[in-house]
Amino acid sequence: MKLASYQSGRDGQLHMVSSDLKLAIPVPDIASTLRDCLDNWDNLLPQLVRCQQDLNAGNLESKATPFNPARCSAPLPRATQWLDGSAYVNHVELARKARGAAMPERFWTDPLMYQGVSDNLLGPCDNIVANSAWGVDFEAELAVITDDVPMGCSAEEAHKHILLVTLCNDISLRNLIPDELEKGFGFVQSKPPSTFGPVAVTPDELGTYWQDGKLSLPMQVHFNNQPFGHPDCARDMTFNFNQLIAHAAKTRPLGRGTIIGSGTVSNKDKSTGSCCLVEQRMLEIIAGGQTLTPYLKAGDTVRIEVTTPEGQSLFGAIEQTYTGNS
Amino acid sequence: MKLASYQSGRDGQLHMVSSDLKLAIPVPDIASTLRDCLDNWDNLLPQLVRCQQDLNAGNLESKATPFNPARCSAPLPRATQWLDGSAYVNHVELARKARGAAMPERFWTDPLMYQGVSDNLLGPCDNIVANSAWGVDFEAELAVITDDVPMGCSAEEAHKHILLVTLCNDISLRNLIPDELEKGFGFVQSKPPSTFGPVAVTPDELGTYWQDGKLSLPMQVHFNNQPFGHPDCARDMTFNFNQLIAHAAKTRPLGRGTIIGSGTVSNKDKSTGSCCLVEQRMLEIIAGGQTLTPYLKAGDTVRIEVTTPEGQSLFGAIEQTYTGNS
């Protein structure tokens, strides 16, 4: 099942999207928003599945319209929780290496995770607006949306709580990060609202590519229409989504609609490129002592997508332009 | 105007409460939840004010019931944003002193603030459930609830965006904090859902006690029915709420229903006591090299309230029992 929220009010208007991303249809008789849909997920599931089957079978073509990602908001434009992990520890190690710092050994067993802003989340084609002096960067990630997760949920139990999977661009203000890292209180000013994929999909839509809380497909990033990175999302993912959920739920229950992010996808094999500018800059520093790649400049574009080997886009594409200062 | 959410579903049931906290009445004809009420605040304000006037004048006594804080959830049981500042820098300085660390000078001009969990927030009389090995502590705070705050809002403009003021108990798991502070990513495991006061009140209800984004009244904390602290909320508040809002909104807009906390209230004059156990412990370390006060033990109670010199409770009281391990 693929679900999207078209821009409407504060919470968007829920749409069912066909598996091939060609058609979309609002489903007000089932739920008007994804938030309402999640609140009553178990009860609504039979109707949702029936609607999806009808849409995929071509039975709703007279009512459906071509799916338009440009009309999408984030699936949950104002969520009640956004927790972003750093599951690709190789990326964290590189960041440390670039500034000459060793990484604590426990980062391989104890995930880094921060709580980020979860309202005013951006739709897949929304412009990025931020002061260029802040060092604006993208980060291509995967994210899952959970149902109610009890406090103390184990990683073994966590997979049951993943209702939806989507894409994320975790926009980062690099020049504001060092000060906030030093404070230790997390990222308030250095992480503005993130962007999410056009559609959020149930794990069954991912077939055998989704296993053990990981997606075995490359994250395809284009920067200014040129290939920039295509690391595999499962490879080098030190903590799978089940482990990230268990980490988040250690001392709190997670309410349904909680979004958990993977952190920037990154492979040790650097021939696969990068999913954020800062990683490219770190590699430049390690190689030659200085950065060559600047942060986003007005007019720069980023495209983030995951497709199957057959070329089917799974979540649609995030396609954003950085418009410069507000 | 005083508003409460009675326990009901995920978002509570909105009630108008009389200014003397004696009577409450549901207001489904105006809005069924505080979230809905905030979404349409400007349109609903005339009806809300009329309802409050009628309730205060005794015109609704046949329909109203005695106000019962034990039936209250948090005003916004699942908010979309909870940002907690550390406005009483004196408290931060003490914490550092107790562990022999100097405080960076910029903490006097650049607020500490973390983004905390904003769903599954606790009602004023809910039990505190957490593993005692985590070092469970309370923190008595004030909090404000905002409307839509544009990105880049100045402190001078911020006061217009404060719709409501309430109490908070920012429950903290002290033994988990050092590890998370060292990581720099903020408090995910060490700050479980906070508790909020029975009622949230419009600033006009606070009269002249509310000035320049500060409340000039003591925060009264009782621990196991004994007076524990009564520091003045305005004194030694280095950053007022206007400044905290401006800090939060530097690189993001704040959606309406954002809750901003003050951090533990603390005065330099230690004869006013403390608003959390850890401050008491820090003072013991500084005085005698060791802590005498343990963290919460099963059965311990905490009561947090603000009253006028005439004895009128402004927000009702948070009254919680720590029940020990889950």
Image (cartoon, coloured by chain):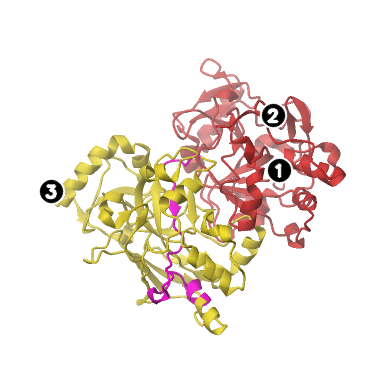
Chain colours: A yellow, B red
**Residue A254 is inside the magenta segment:** yes
Image mark for residue A298: none
Q: Amino acid at mark 3?
A: Asn
Examine the rendering and report whether any part of residue A78 can be seen. Answer: no
Q: Secondary structure at mark 2?
A: strand
Mark 2–mark 1 Cα distance, whole angstroms, equals 14 Å
> Which chain does the residue under circle 1 lie in?
B
Residue B88, image x, y percentages: 74, 48
Q: Quadrant of residue B175?
A: top right
Q: Are marks 2 and 3 on the same chain?
A: no
- Considering only vertical position in the picture, is B73 above or below A291? above
Q: Secondary structure at mark 1?
A: loop
Residue B159, image x, y percentages: 64, 49
Q: Is residue B115 left or right of residue B233?
A: left
Mark 3–mark 1 Cα distance, whole angstroms, equals 59 Å
Q: Which residue is mark 2?
A: B303
Q: Amino acid at mark 1?
A: Thr
**Residue A306 is inside the magenta segment:** no
Q: Which residue is mark 1?
A: B264
Q: Residue furthest top?
A: B62
Mark 2–mark 3 Cα distance, whole angstroms, equals 61 Å
Q: Secondary structure at mark 3?
A: loop
User: Which circle, 3 or 1, is nearer the viewer?
Assistant: 1
Q: Which residue is mark 3?
A: A59
Range shown magenta:
A253-282
Q: Is residue B211 left or right of residue A4?
A: right
> Which chain does the residue under circle 3 lie in?
A
